[in-house]
Image: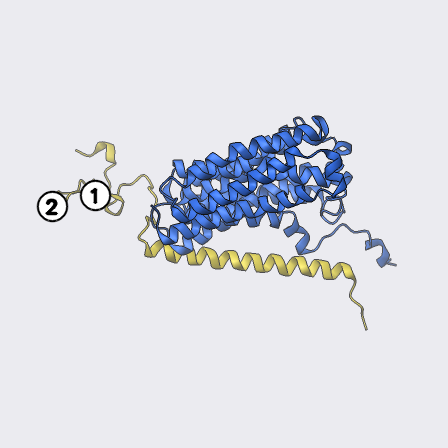
Chain colours: A blue, B yellow
Amino acid sequence: MTDINAYDASPEGEFRDYVALLKPRVMSLVVFTAFVGLWVAPGQVHPFIGFCAVLFIALGGGASGALNMWYDRDIDAVMNRTRSRPIPSGRVQESEALGLGIVLGTISVMMLGLVANWFAAGFLAFTIFFYAVVYTVWLKRSTPQNIVIGGAAGAFPPMIGWACATGGIGIESILMFMLIFVWTPPHFWALALFMKEDYHRAGVPMLTVTHGRRSTRRHILAYAVALAPFAIGLGLTSIGGPLYMAVSVVLNVAFLRGCWQIFRRSEDQAIADDYAVEKRVFRLSLYYLFLHFLALLVQSWLGGW
Amino acid sequence: MRIEHELHARRRSRNVGLGLVLLAFVALIFALTVVKVRQGDLMEAYDHQPRVSLTPLDTPAGAPAEETPAGVPAEEAP
């Protein structure tokens, strides 16, 4: 006699659980920045080729997300924010996530090579390796600078988009990389100041825990200062123009002002108003990146200098 | 009346999702092939037998293209 209740604890997931392994929210940033990198690059790309290139760059990003979730399953099970992810909640098996990551990573690299060029495909393979191995396996659990170095993986997509159109790299694509790379630490540390995640319990060294919150505030300001020249410098290249420059100057002034306020505040002041400034700067940082890339897109449409 | 177990609904969701993804992939490859062919991209690979269709397109106009006689390996050609 069969007891149907025996299946109740089955770990079989729905289709959306496998989609969740690809970190769709991170993919949306990858899609947007890769698209802008491809769009502003010199040369003509057939619209359908461009669509496929962005699709496979996003798929590569999703594959690295699945590999990250596979490796970090022990950390994810401990932290409140990640406890309901597909692997720790038991809806997807560990081996399934590993298999999905490897297969999708391979497909995305091969397809990007066939669709665009092998330089871009190699770049995508390196990005997947960087995020899944260099960041997730080597650095995330060993250094409080994990966010800084890991940010590089999120910064590569516009360079890959550019490489799809040009077959190489240029000063413009390097500056787009630097814009995201230097933006990531202050963006994430502003979040870390008010989220107070249980990273410590999970064994992940976060700057707020290892060096203290005062030091984190100093780091946020230092990175915001370092970020401005790259953002504005991008406006002086062939893909910049008056509109981008105006947007960039306004955003950098606002961001520097916000980071200066974070630097000046004590922890007691922050607790008193429930981290209002930190939350505002975190929201501003999201607009900062989105509007910079949007400005590049519109500037390219209008024509540059 | 049989009531469907929730497990089967989850399996169906996976099967339908995967089916749609595979169909979309097939459509994508087909469309990509059409676009690539229309762009005039090289569709033939070198198979160790030189052929006219694989000679470089930038041969100067009027210059005789170097061809290997059929059946003669390239390294033995005069």
Tell me what residue is drawn at x 78 percent, y 33 percent.
A201
Q: Specify whether A204 is left or right of A149.
A: right
Note whether A223 is above or below A241 in the view shown: above
Note whether B14 is above or below B65 in the view shown: below
Q: Specify whether A11 is left or right of A245.
A: right
The residue that mark 2 highlights is B62
**Which of A103/A66 is in front?**
A66
Q: Is residue A169 visible?
A: no
Q: Amino acid at mark 2?
A: Gly
**Which of A76/A184 is in front?**
A184
* Labels 1 and 2 in the same subunit: yes
Q: Is residue A294 visible?
A: yes
Label 1 – label 2 distance at C-alpha: 12 Å
**Which of A185/A160 is in front?**
A185
Q: Residues within 10 Å of mark 1 (few under 14, many from 20)?
A: few
**Residue A85: x, y in percent?**
72, 46
Q: Quadrant of residue A154?
A: top right
Q: Residue furthest bottom?
A: B1
- The quadrant of the rendering that contains the N terminus of chain B is bottom right
Residue B58 numbered mark, or none: 1
Residue A292 numbered mark, or none: none
Note whether A27 is above or below A203 in the view shown: below
Give the SS element for disc 1. loop
**Residue A69: x, y in percent?**
67, 41
Q: Residue furthest left?
A: B62
**Residue A242: x, y in percent?**
39, 47
Q: Amino acid at mark 1?
A: Asp
Tell me what residue is drawn at x 77 percent, y 43 percent.
A80
Q: Quadrant of residue A101?
A: top right
